[in-house]
Amino acid sequence: MEKREQLYEGKAKKVYSTDDPELLIVSYKDDATAFNGLKKGTIAGKGAINNRMTNNIMRRLEEAGVPTHYVEELSDRETVVKKVSIVPLEVIIRNISAGSFAKRYGVDEGIVFDEPTIEFSYKNDDLGDPLINDYHAVALKLATWEEIELIKKYAFKVNDLLKGFMKEIGIDLVDFKLEFGKTSDGTIILADEISPDTCRFWDEKTHEKLDKDRFRRDLGGAEDAYQEVMRRLMGE
Ligand code: TMP
């Protein structure tokens, strides 16, 4: 499978067409941004780590019954995925208060919830990805009720599974963001990535942050944190 033309360049990945109209190649970059692109930098080695970690997790989710876009890892940075049209909703699950939740409601980070929460943001950079509810998403025809129900079901299932995968390696899954897409026949599948860019991971004992918050908050040590999660997850 080879890259044809570049279709899209996002903040963290490039997307290429292939000779199969149903398949794309994604290429992960080391570029890091935060606050809707206002803060820019690089995290050395991040592209390869996020690619390989995402694929490892997607394969395990697929085995557990969550349909994903993953097809085949081509190299450290490149993966073949199914072509989808992305549902323009960022689906956020939280197990522990942090980030925008703590800020919005004026509470500390680190409150462990009795049950996970779900929320959606409208994926629209011009508007700064505003919070949106399901009625508004349906009104704007971003998704149907059936699609939203399926997305919620898959998102909570990913949470149960991913929480387990991370617990095995001594990491608490604080929160994360998922994106879903629709294949040409209308099937909803999990797309995008699952990595320290899109999840909050805290060491279960020290509560050290092992994710992109090290970059967002200028804590230093982002490279080492990404490496550490990779080492624990994949034994390297
Ligand atoms: P938040 O607390 O800033 O709303 O972030 C919730 C989760 O979503 C966190 O794990 C980081 C992830 N996230 C992204 O993947 N992309 C984004 O653009 C933002 C703002 C958050």
Image (tube, rainbow, N blue to C red):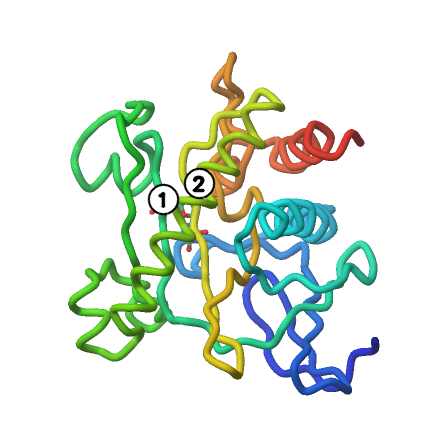
Q: Residue at x 65, y 82 (%)?
A: 22
Q: Is residue 153 above or below residue 6?
A: above
Disc 2 target residue? 159
Q: Is residue 31 left or right of residue 162?
A: right
Between disc 1 and disc 2, whose residue precedes? Answer: 1
Instruction: Pick the quarter of the image with the N terminus.
Output: bottom right
- Toward which corner of the image does residue 99 lie, by quadrant? top left
- Toward which corner of the image does residue 179 lie, by quadrant? bottom left
Q: In the displayed orientation, state which residue is furthest to the top.
A: 205
Disc 1 target residue? 93
Q: Is residue 79 left or right of residue 129?
A: right
- Residue type at mark 1 is Ile
Name the mark on residue 111. none
Q: Are marks 1 and 2 in contact (CB under 8 Å)?
A: yes
* Residue 83, image x, y percentages: 60, 77
Mark 1, residues whose alpha carbon is within 10 Å: few (<14), some, or many (≥20)? Answer: many
- Residue type at mark 2 is Asn
* Residue 75, image x, y percentages: 83, 59
* Residue 23, image x, y percentages: 68, 78
